[in-house]
Image: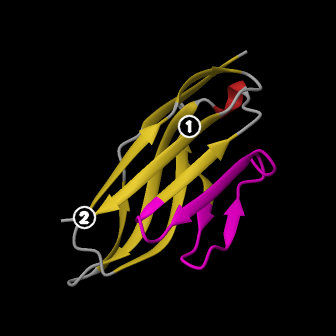
Amino acid sequence: QVQLVGSGGGLVQAGGSLSLSCAASGSIIRLKEMGWYRQAPGKQRELVAVITSGGVTDYADSVKGRFTISRDNAKKMVYLQMNSLKPEDTAVYYCNARILTLTRESDYWGQGKQVSVSS
């Protein structure tokens, strides 16, 4: 059984920084793309950042230059460093990973972590 467990987040004033981590565990043959999504109240879930197994990254325009995604393949972890936070970054953040197991390749989600930015 595969699990993604997130940690981090919290409450910060505008301009501050927060970080998120997510650890994958279970019967994993290969970790492919990993990423972070967020969902604000009343809005659809949106992609924040993604990183391939080779380290190629992509970001939503709204976070470029402020957020950094990284991963540690040996530890099966993905990270999101969030700097210069804005109130509009307030949302529940979810980690995501495309994972190959012995039986299938599928997308997995971690539990959401609240990030709140006060003005």
**Whole-percent x, y for residue 85 in the image:** 72, 32
Q: How many tags in the picture?
A: 2
Q: Is residue 44 visible?
A: no
In the picture shown, does residue 10 fall above or below 76? above
Q: Which residue is mark 1?
A: 43
**Whole-percent x, y for residue 76 in the image:** 41, 65
At a point 26% along the width and 79% down the height, the residue shown is: 101
| Disc 2: CA contacts within 10 A as few (<14), some (14-19) or many (>=20) | few
- Check if residue 59 falls in the magenta segment: yes
Q: Is residue 10 left or right of residue 101?
A: right
**Whole-percent x, y for residue 25 in the image:** 28, 62
Which amino acid lies under the numbered mark 1 shown in the image of this protein?
Lys
Q: Residue furthest top?
A: 119
What is the magenta range?
A: 50-77
Quarter of the image holding residue 82?
Answer: top right
At a point 22% along the width and 84% down the height, the residue shown is: 102
1 or 2: mark nearer the eye = 2
At a point 36% along the width and 73% down the height, the residue shown is: 99
**Whole-percent x, y for residue 68 in the image:** 68, 53
Q: Is residue 55 visible?
A: yes
Which amino acid lies under the numbered mark 2 shown in the image of this protein?
Val
Residue 2, numbered label: 2
